[in-house]
Image (cartoon, rainbow, N blue to C red):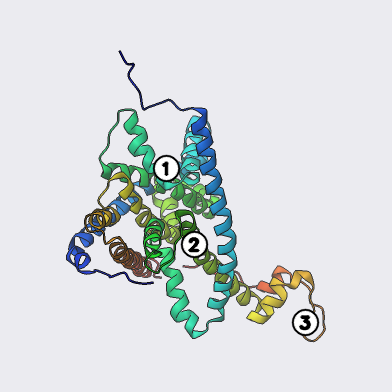
Amino acid sequence: MFDYNFHWRPVIRSLPDLLEASLLTLQVATLSMLIGIVIGLGLSVIRLRMRGPLYWFATAWIELARNTPALFQLFFFGFGLGALGWHMTPYMIVLSGLTFNNAGYLAENFRGGFQAVPETQMRAARSLGMSLWQTYTRILVPQVLRIVYYPMTNQLVWAVLMSSLGMLVGFRELSGETQFFASRTYRIFEYFAVTAVIYYVLVKLILLASRLLAMRLFRY
Amino acid sequence: MDTPISFFSGFGLQDVLFMAEAAWRTLLISLISISLGTLLGTLFGWMLYEGRIWATLFLAPILDAFRSVPLIIQLVLFYNFVPIIGLNLDAFQSGLVVLTLYTASLVANEVRGVEVASASFAGSHRRALRRVWYGSKGQSTSSGRTTRLLSPREVVGDETVPIPF
């Protein structure tokens, strides 16, 4: 038992590459969150205010995003659309898959946020002469974003963790880079152990940043 | 002349059977890991709430790590770690262990949250256990008196629940 020799030297040698790849992980997760927030807001408003084809479109999006595995969604954008002749780069596959997933989850968060804002706010804003667009962008959405701030942080953490599935569609973010190096050196355990630590630190940094931002944003 | 052989076939009944078998394995691993994970998580959550120093120092960071590292990394890591310590687990068993621990870490956090919430509503942890958790069953207290389930007003009081920020 335990006649395994750990070799950390190749891992340490490729640490700069792994850290650079972790920036790519952060980038794709953040971008997918930003686009996801915009789409999610749209989906939740459609679900709350509209009926007809748009309502069914938004419902289908949310249900599919929340009830199918993120890996399946990535494969759909990679191999599914690829089979139909629409080929995307691995970066775009992960970005679109994560955005689709984030938008679905965030839409439900936003729905809760919109329902938490009293209906009278809308009536008050409209009676002051604001247009519907002004009411949403200046009155409702700022309050909703404040209410769902912490769920959004959770979603960002989720996006960072889910971006690791990119390695299965050939994307060289942190996990993909780790798999690349592990398959070249056969030090699978060592590489993935270090990657796990990097992910842990990334998540803690995100949580710390979100707390600092919250202290600044929600100061009275 | 030989007829050309094709290695590709359309989607057939046999494929559906293979997929059904895989779906069964998905259900099975989920059922077992969620059941075991819930039991373990309840235990861990209780240990965290009780706040012994070793639980806070050792258990909390380990459970936190399960929630902060992608599941796929945990699976690869554990699957490659098992042979190192001389065990022989197949992919299903490895997955089962990882998913159980992952579920346990999530459940532990929930259980600790429920304990904190019920204790803060009921005044103390002991009262929470006695009145909020077991209260509906009308169990006897140590003094022999039978408790009743507190009404929400009695538990919460007249204070409104503060908004987090």
Disc 1 and disc 3 on one polypeptide chain: no
Measured Cα–Cα span from mark 1 to mark 3: 52 Å
- The residue carrying mark 1 is A72
Secondary structure category for the residue under label 3:
loop
Do the residues bearing badges 1 and 3 touch, measured as CB atoms within 8 Å? no
Q: Which residue is mark 2?
A: B97
How many dots with numbers? 3
- Residue A56, given in percent of the width and then of the height, sits at 51, 34
Q: Nearer the viewer, mark 1 or mark 2?
A: 2
Asked whether, in this view, residue A21 is left or right of residue B10, the answer is: left
| Image x and y of residue B76, in percent | 37, 58
**Residue A111 visible, this angle:** yes
The three-letter amino acid code for the residue at tag 2 is Val
Circle 1 packing at 10 Å, graded few (<14), some (14-19), many (20+), is some
Q: Chain of mark 3?
A: B
Alpha carbon separation for disc pair 3 and 2: 39 Å
Secondary-structure class at tag 1: helix
- First in sequence: mark 3 or mark 2? 2
The N terminus of chain B: image quadrant? top left
Find residue B141 and name its label. 3
* Residue located 74% across and 69% down the image: B151
Under mark 1, the amino acid is Phe
- Seen from the viewer's position, the closer of residues B13 and B34 is B13
